[in-house]
Amino acid sequence: MDDRKATVRLYPLSSATRKQHDLTPTGDVNARRSNLAETLNIATSVFLSNDEESFDDMVTHGLVPIADAVGIDRVCIYQDVHVDGKTRFLQIYRWCRLPDETLTAIPHLLPESEITDAWHAALMRGECVHLRQSEMNEDEWYYLHTSGLSSVYIVPIFMRHRYWGSIALQNTTNDCYFEDDCLDLLQSAARLFAFAYVRTEAETKAEELRNYNATLFESAPIGLAVFNEDCKIVDSNEAFLRMHGVDKQTLLEQFFHLLPDVQPDGRKSVDKAIDIMKRALAGEQMVIEWMHKSATGEFVPSELTLTSMVRDGKRYGLAYIYDLRYVKRLEADTKQHREKAAMTRVWERAYKDLRKKVDNLGINVDQPQVNPEGVPKE
């Protein structure tokens, strides 16, 4: 995040208000700043910790001290979205000191307005926006009033030198003036809050992706094994375990002992397995037939598809194993049916030839044969 501290007061302070703050005793200013710096240190410790608490809990522990110090009761996170060719503010997170059932659901798209257009232009330049109702005209007051706000301080957030969104520190009850001598600390607090949100979102998405991949891995109807650069099986799914009839620990520790001595082509299984693993790790993709053996000694014909991937800077091989036992049984059954059908055709041809010869002799085999005395012949 860039450290940008410029603040835009879109509406000038009244001379009475400016005079009031110019006369603030130096000791009070230093005490106020010291108090805010202390609360910022607390928030930093909370937001940068690796505790397993939820983001809402982190906000409660880290943001509430800052809210107390500067007098805010609502904090919102906004990101830009494009609707009908216009840039709009989308509220993606909101913290409120007290529950408020009248607020709109999140995410919430702010109404289109020239006011928000001006905010966006300032924020894109890296400038903060400071607004309070006592300094606004009727239209401006109405816009904030409909949002339930009396004052707001909006801080732009930049990620990798690109505008990411903004954090709005809001007061819904008082016409609050955020002191100039503390604005840099408020900006730091806002950016810290944004960092915590982005980190939490990234961790959540990473966990969802891990769960998604794990589901795909375990529920795949075909076997899947992962091996490392030492040609050692490091993971497998349930389908591959069922194929061998062993638990995962046994498979990982004794995989090569579970192979038959030789493959159908006569090569030793261990030698051939290491050879194809190394070829896959070198980037070759291949599809071959392979003979596995279960823990009960049953041979398991299969088709292997081997490839590789890079994870955490290391290359791993992937072996997709399709169990061909059912296919082989189908092939055997089909062969048997074909042989029976062929024999049936042979007997049909023999019968037709015999029937033709009998018909040529004038013998009606469909009628019983009798002797001259009318007794049926045996």
Image (tube, helix red, strand yellow):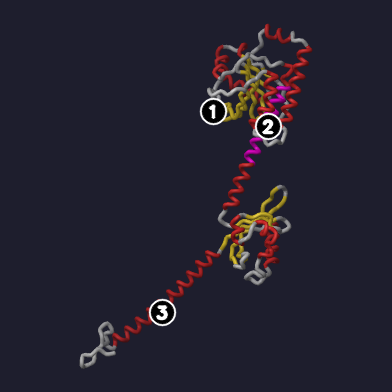
Direction from residue 310 to residue 99 in the image, left or right = left
Q: Residue at x 71, y 36 (%)?
A: 50
Name which residue type carries label 3.
Val
N-terminal label among 3 and 1: 1
Label 2, label 3: how many angstroms apart (C-alpha)?
A: 81 Å
Name which residue type carries label 1.
Ala
User: Where is residue 58 drawn, in percent x and y?
Assistant: 67, 30
Tell me, yes or no, whether the highlighted magenta stretch contains residue 205: yes
* Residue that numbered label 2 is attached to: 196
Q: Residues within 10 Å of mark 1 (few under 14, many from 20)?
A: few
Which quarter of the figure has residue 111? top right
Q: Residue at x 56, y 12 (%)?
A: 138
Which span is picked out in magenta?
Answer: 185-206
Direction from residue 26 to residue 342 in the image, left or right = left
Name which residue type carries label 2.
Ala
Mark 2 and mark 3 residues within 8 Å of each other at the beta carbon: no
Label 3: which secondary element = helix
* Residue that numbered label 3 is attached to: 346
Label 1, label 2: how many angstroms apart (C-alpha)?
A: 22 Å
Tell me, yes or no, whether the highlighted magenta stretch contains residue 329: no
The mark found on residue 352 in the picture is none
Between circles 2 and 3, the one closer to the viewer is: 2
User: Where is residue 102 drawn, in percent x and y?
Assistant: 53, 22
User: Where is residue 104 drawn, in percent x and y?
Assistant: 53, 25
Label 3, label 1: how many angstroms apart (C-alpha)?
A: 79 Å
